Amino acid sequence: MRSIRGPEPRARRCVLALLGALLTACPALPDGPRYLGAGNPQPVRGGTLMMWEEPRVRMLDPHAAFDEISGVLIRMLFDSLYSYDYALKLVPAIASALPTISADGRTLTVPIRRGVRFHNGRVLTARDVVWSFERMLHPDLNSPGAPYYRAIVGLTAYRAKRAPHIAGLSAPDEHTFRIELTRPDQSFAFTLAMRFASPLAREEVERPGADMKRRPVGQGPFRLVTWDPGVRLVLERHRRYYDPERPYLDSVVFEEGLKRDTAFMRFRNGEVDIVPRMSPADTMFVRSGGFQAFSGLGPQADVYGFFLNVELAPFDNVHIRRAVAFAIDRERWARARNGAIRPAGQLLPPKVMGHDTALPHLQYFDLARAKAEMAAAGHPDGLDEPVTLWTSDGSTARLYGQLLQADLSKIGIEVQIKSVSFPVYLEETGKPKTAQMVSGGWVMDFPDPSNFLNLVSSAARSEHDSINKSFYSDPKLDALLDRAIVERDAVARAAMYREANDFVAEAAPWAFFCNTQAMQAWQPYVKGFRPHPAYWLAINDVWLDLPRKRIAQAGRRDALQRPTGVLPLLWGGP
């Protein structure tokens, strides 16, 4: 009688033999690098760098884009007036030297480097810088960068369309750019290193059919060759770049929308050159395996949490907001991410002026306190209706949403997750009275506390692409930030920012939960790359030690059974 439990012995042997043959034919992933470099002691030119990211690139217009993923490409295509070194010191880029600041602190004079050329070959002048600032600050563009430059003389009249130009911007000659401010601003020089300070060629912007979001013409070390949206971008070296030695690479292929687990397997197979982010399992693999010497872990100047929209119920009630903040079990979340995040209960990250672990109103996990805040709000038994959490479409965002659901269920708040694509997420959550609760964060643009605290100021609220996604503001906080920005005494200024930081923690327009630690890995032949404290994926100085050499390396088939990776949170979170 034929067995009903499985195939006949002969058939079973055939199946097992076939499976064995398939396993034998299946290439094994190596435990370490497949390739080493040639051993060149100095940078050599040539080669194509293979990169990837999980979210899709939104746009490439430096005056309009403000998400981290777009910023990776924009920094390759455009130079700003200044940039940052690894010590977070301001260094010249298109500017040839640091700005000269007048005795009263209200005038900055910036020397413009000679010989800078746009990708179309034309030489850049100071007039291009003035025109580009006026384009970026024009009200019709709705640039998210506009709030950073509100101290420029004449900006109010210009944005109200009462003046054709900004009175405080001028080009006394082709190599001098001058900015006049309405008041001293201790952080203003830093804004000149932001992508919004990238000069554009007017003739390219105004050319019929021009599309700076999709077909930009910059002056950076690379130029865009092709972009197949959702698939890949191809960049090539700008052959008339002002620094004749850079960039070293001939080209860069940037794949977008690539799943993390797939990308990491390709990295192990030698097909991808840099891993920008890893799952907890892959992080453990890198730390203990052959890639350990070719990886780096760097604390990031960022903060992540949940924006609580104060224009929409129930978060128009401060007690509900505080209840959410005290209900988050941050230590549990850090364990769930295998140490990739550090618990945070304040807006300012470590090493930024005003950060204080002993902040009086620091947010922390306290379930009893959270329930007391719910009672103070008139909801001791919880909310009658669920709240909607907006997230980007990734598994990390879903993980944080699920963790939040579990924590808030303990105080009677039901969370429904609304997951959308990254571009839709950015667009919709920047609109007033649209997103009740938003999973997101902020990555430092410049090393000053104003860069974080301005996120909850009235100046950061806008009708489109608002960077103040909780739409919170308070005149007392605005006044405090206005005083701090002009204060020249470092001790007094630090005290003001600590007070503002505490004010925000208590008002809870955000429920904070973490700062991140970036673990990135690269192939042995990739030189000049390491995690940068200010820039995600800083590759402008990368070179490839070619020709690469193949290594005989034993592999592990069981690596194919590792848990799959997870996708990032807002603005490229881990």
Image (cartoon, rainbow, N blue to C red):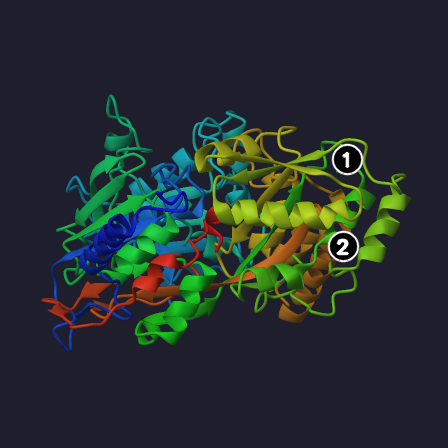
Callout 2: SS: helix
As drawn, the label of residue 32 is none
From the viewer's perspective, is 337 left or right of 513?
left
- Label for residue 326? 2
Q: CA distance from mark 1 to mark 2?
A: 16 Å
The answer to whether residue 21 is above or below residue 428 is: below
Q: Quadrant of the N terminus?
A: top left
Q: Residue at x 49, y 57 (%)?
A: 446
Task: Decide which of 282, 524 is in the foreground and name it.
Answer: 282
Q: Residue at the top extreme?
A: 208
Residue 217 falls in image quadrant: top left
Q: Residue at x 62, y 32 (%)?
A: 435
Q: Which mark is residue 314?
A: 1
Q: Is residue 90 above or below residue 205?
A: below
Q: Specify the quadrant of the image occupied by residue 66.
A: top left
Residue at (14% x, 42% y) in the render: 121
Horizontal placement of 468 versus 164: left or right? right
In front here: 369 or 509? Answer: 369
Q: Nearer the viewer, residue 522 or 31?
A: 31
Q: Secondary structure at mark 1?
A: loop
In the picture, measured across the screen, residue 133 lies left or right of residue 320, that is left
Q: Nearer the viewer, residue 2 or 36?
A: 2
Residue at the spot 16% in from the left edge and 73% down from the top edge: 552
Return the disc, 1 or 2, that comes first in the chain's sequence. 1
